[in-house]
């Protein structure tokens, strides 16, 4: 059967879904209540006169997140350059849709159900039915694409929007005014996602759909966690996954962090800063996050207060 997803579906998945990698994917699957703090999810890294502001982004945001704390806006205004994971303003939706279809959609008679156990397949079918995704469409998604879809749809229904994401907000402000550098490309992220091995696909989808289904939609509003500025609570949430997915989660998060730290370090060495560095919150926090890596390299890095 010659099958194609509708263009609006691919637009959603290629832009919002790909950028969910660093924060929203993990957080949406295991929401938790954060404790009250008076900090924001931004750190200041210093090396002599050189400064990099490291802001943890939520790639899908809500209106309640704005206006942002003044300390964040001030850091952006002081910066000459901006670094993001992917410059989504430069991503061609048509080209990305074709790549998503090529890497994420089964052709011929092959289907998602042939790669899953019956209990997992039944759970996935029921989940997509709840969000009005036809079985014809869901059956042709490869496991990684089905997982991203399962993560994004509830957040979108809860009112979150990629156009209100933190990185998109600042990309719009920076256009034509600041140097913009992308740490990664959309193709790199797509290749990473589509490398999900078949032997963990069943565990991955069973866990993803199960965790999202257990959550109330209001709990999926990641801005509530983000606004707390509680890095420890966020890291605890991101760390929750089945042991069988350790390798997958490492490839999505920790393995990418050294390169991101390298990009930040360029500006700490005086390469065109001050720099406003915005990546998924999951990449900054934890023992192997960008903040910890820069600290281990001898830089002074500290979290900023919200006021």
Image: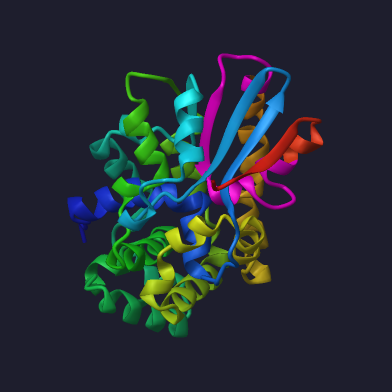
| Residue 234, x across and y down, in percent | 60, 60
Whether 192 is drawn above or below 113: the answer is: above
Residue 303 shows in this picture: yes
- Number of marks in picture: 0
Q: Which residues are magenta?
A: 267-292
Is 277 contained in the magenta span? yes
Residue drawn at x 68%, y 46% as measured from the top left: 289
Identify the coloring: rainbow
Q: Is residue 272 left or right of residue 255?
A: left
- Please identify the quarter of the rendering in which residue 35 is found: bottom right
| Residue 70, x across and y down, in percent | 46, 40
| Residue 39, x across and y down, in percent | 59, 51
Residue drawn at x 46%, y 85% as measured from the top left: 119
Which of the two residues, 143 or 2, is positioned nearer the viewer here? Answer: 143
Residue 109 shows in this picture: no
| Residue 18, x across and y down, in percent | 41, 48
Q: Is residue 13 left or right of residue 196?
A: left
Residue drawn at x 72%, y 23% as measured from the top left: 47
Q: In the displayed image of the protein, which residue is found farthest to the front?
A: 307
Q: Quadrant of the N terminus?
A: bottom left
Which of the two residues, 281 or 152, is positioned nearer the viewer here? Answer: 281
Whether 12 is drawn above or below 274: the answer is: below
Is 87 contained in the magenta span? no
Residue drawn at x 33%, y 82% as measured from the top left: 126
Which of the two residues, 176 or 155, is positioned nearer the viewer here? Answer: 176
């Amino acid at each position: 059967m010659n099958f194609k997803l509708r263009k609006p579906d691919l637009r959603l998945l290629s832009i919002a879904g790909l950028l969910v990698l660093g924060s929203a994917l993990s957080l949406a699957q295991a929401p938790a209540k954060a404790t009250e703090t008076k900090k924001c999810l931004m750190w200041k890294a210093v090396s002599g006169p050189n400064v990099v502001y490291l802001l943890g982004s939520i790639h899908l945001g809500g209106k309640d997140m704005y206006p942002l704390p003044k300390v964040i806006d001030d850091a952006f205004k002081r910066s000459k350059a901006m670094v993001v994971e992917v410059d989504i303003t430069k991503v061609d939706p048509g080209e990305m849709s074709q790549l998503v279809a090529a890497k994420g959609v089964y052709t011929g008679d092959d289907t998602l159900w042939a790669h899953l156990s019956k209990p997992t397949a039944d759970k996935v079918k029921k989940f997509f039915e709840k969000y009005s995704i036809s079985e014809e469409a869901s059956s042709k998604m490869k496991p990684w694409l089905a997982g991203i879809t399962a993560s994004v749809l509830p957040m979108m229904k809860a009112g979150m929007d990629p156009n209100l994401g933190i990185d998109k907000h600042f990309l719009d402000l920076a256009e034509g005014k600041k140097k913009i550098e992308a740490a990664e490309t959309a193709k790199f992220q797509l290749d990473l996602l589509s490398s999900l091995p078949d032997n963990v696909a069943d565990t991955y989808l069973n866990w993803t759909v199960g965790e999202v289904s257990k959550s109330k939609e209001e709990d999926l509003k990641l801005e509530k966690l983000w606004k707390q500025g509680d890095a420890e609570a966020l890291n605890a949430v991101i760390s929750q996954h089945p042991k069988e997915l350790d390798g997958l989660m490492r490839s999505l998060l920790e393995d990418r962090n050294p390169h991101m730290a390298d990009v930040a370090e360029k500006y700490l060495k005086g390469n065109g800063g001050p720099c406003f560095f915005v990546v998924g919150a999951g990449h900054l926090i934890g023992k192997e996050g960008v903040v910890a890596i820069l600290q281990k390299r001898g830089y002074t890095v500290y979290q900023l207060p919200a006021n």
